[in-house]
């Protein structure tokens, strides 16, 4: 097996910012994405996540909603209001699972929604689909 993992899961590598305040979840998402060849930048709160996005201009942002300092709603608002960053796909990874939560997340500017708890192989497939433009509803960035 290559560092990209099983071929059926290996779509494309990308630079991904993961914003998650739960240390175990942050470590798991980072580990799984790196195991499949992605370059991963980790942030433990929304403010740190916004700084990372502005400095590295990733291919994808994976963000929890319930975060300290700056929550996921505000992360989405700021990223989508910034013309230099608003084309970066933004995916919520959240435990919000009430009726209407998915629609609320998408209406807030997120391009997609992944529910917690994550299952590593499914999570990688979902992330790869956002990177290659086959998932979500938002615009996709070009080949930078």
Image (tube, rainbow, N blue to C red):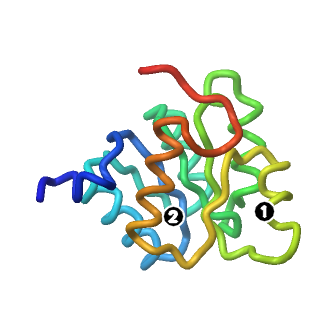
- Residue plotted at (61% across, 63% down): 114
The answer to whether the residues at label 1 and label 2 have Cβ atoms under 8 Å apart is: no
Mark number for residue 48?
none
Q: From this viewpoint, which residue is outermost toward the left?
A: 1
Q: Position of residue 101 (x, y in %)?
A: 82, 67
Q: With 93 as the anchor, is 143 left or right in this view?
A: left
User: Against 122, is 4 above or below?
Assistant: above
Image quarter of the N terminus: bottom left
Q: Nearer the viewer, residue 118 or 24?
A: 118
**Label 2: how many residues lie within 10 Å, few (<14), some (14-19) or many (20+)?**
some
How many numbered callouts? 2
User: Residue 18: x, y in percent?
Assistant: 48, 55
Please give left or right for residue 120 compared with residue 46 in the image.
Answer: left
Q: Residue at x 82, y 77 (%)?
A: 98
Query: Residue at label 1?
Result: 102
CA gap, disc 1 and disc 2: 23 Å
> Dot 2: what SS?
loop
What residue lies at 58% left-to-right and 34% top-to-bottom?
Answer: 88
Q: Residues within 10 Å of mark 1 (few under 14, many from 20)?
A: some
Q: Which label sits in the foreground, 1 or 2?
A: 1
From the viewer's perspective, is residue 87 above or below residue 90? Answer: above
Where residue 36 sits in the image (x, y, percent)?
28, 54
Observer-nearest of 127 and 94: 127
Residue positioned 77% across, 31% down in the render: 81
Question: Residue 144, position in %: x, y?
Answer: 42, 21
Callout 1: SS: helix
Toward the front, the furthest residue is 8
Q: Which residue lies under the disc numbered 2?
A: 44
Marked residue nearer the N-terminal end (1 or 2)? 2
Residue 37 vertical placement versus 67 (above, below): above
């Amino acid at each position: 097996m290559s560092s990209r993992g099983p071929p059926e899961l290996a779509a494309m590598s990308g630079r991904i910012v993961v914003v998650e305040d739960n240390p175990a979840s942050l470590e798991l998402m980072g580990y799984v994405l790196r195991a499949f060849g992605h370059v991963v930048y980790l942030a433990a709160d929304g403010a740190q996540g916004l700084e990372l996005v502005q400095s590295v201009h990733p291919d994808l942002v994976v963000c929890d909603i319930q975060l300290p300092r700056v929550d996921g709603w505000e992360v989405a608002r700021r990223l989508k209001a910034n013309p230099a960053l608003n084309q970066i796909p933004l995916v919520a990874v959240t435990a919000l699972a009430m009726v209407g939560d998915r629609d609320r997340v998408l209406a807030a500017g997120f391009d997609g929604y992944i529910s917690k708890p994550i299952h590593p192989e499914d999570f990688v497939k979902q992330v790869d689909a956002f990177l290659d433009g086959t998932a979500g509803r938002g615009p996709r960035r070009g080949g930078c």
